[in-house]
Amino acid sequence: CRLSEKKKHKMEELKSSNEGLAKANLEKGNKVESLQEEVATLAGEVQLCQDRVQKMIERRRKISECNSTQVLKAKLSRAFMEHDNASRALETAYFVGDQDWKVFSASYIKSRIEYHQCRELHERLDH
């Protein structure tokens, strides 16, 4: 009889312990779900931040490319060649007789000044 009471008591203790563990597991399960949702939200925010940073990096790269020495030199080369070609066209027009002296001289001097300014900047980039 005593043995069976001990068994019953032990069974009750185990049952009570199991119920406590089951409740604790359920509570932790809810907390785990809540934490998983929070992690998913934070992961989305991190991804948005990473996307913004990547766009800024790409924008900075494009700006750097536009302002690189080689790009500036190429732009200046095109500019001084355009001014040189324009001044030569003015010379031709004047010598052919299509322009009078005042128009020719003002336009020609302006074009040559711009040519030499671009050329000087281009040469400064080499040093």
Image (cartoon, grey):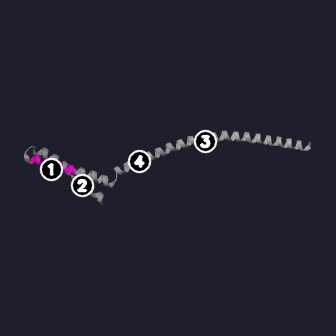
Marks 2 and 3 in Cβ contact (< 8 Å): no
Q: Which of marks 3 and 4 is nearer the N terminus?
A: 3
Mark-to-mark CA distance, 3 and 1: 74 Å
The earlier-in-sequence mark between 3 and 1 is 3
Number of the label disc, if any, that sits on residue 119 = 2
Bounds of the magenta span?
A: 81-94
Q: Is residue 73 left or right of residue 52?
A: left
Q: Which residue is drawn at 10% across and 47% down?
A: 94
In the depicted view, which residue is nearer to us: 79 or 45? 45
Q: Mark 1 points at which residue?
A: 88
- Mark 3 to mark 4 CA distance (whole Å): 33 Å
Report if the CB atoms under discs 1 and 4 are less than 8 Å apart: no
Cα gap from disc 2 to disc 1, whole angstroms = 16 Å
User: Across the whole image, how many numbered discs are drawn on residues?
Assistant: 4
Query: Label 4: which residue?
Result: 58
> Secondary structure beneath disc 2?
helix
The circle on residue 106 is none
| Location of residue 34 by image quarter | top right
The residue shown at (64%, 42%) is 32
Q: Report x, y in % for residue 89.
A: 14, 47
What residue is drawn where x is 51% and y is 44%? 47
Q: Which mark is residue 36?
A: 3
* Distance in Å between CA atoms under marks 2 and 4: 31 Å
Q: Do the residues labelled 3 and 4 touch (CB within 8 Å)?
A: no
Look at label 1 and name its amino acid.
Arg
Pick whichever of labels 2 and 4 is earlier in the sequence: 4
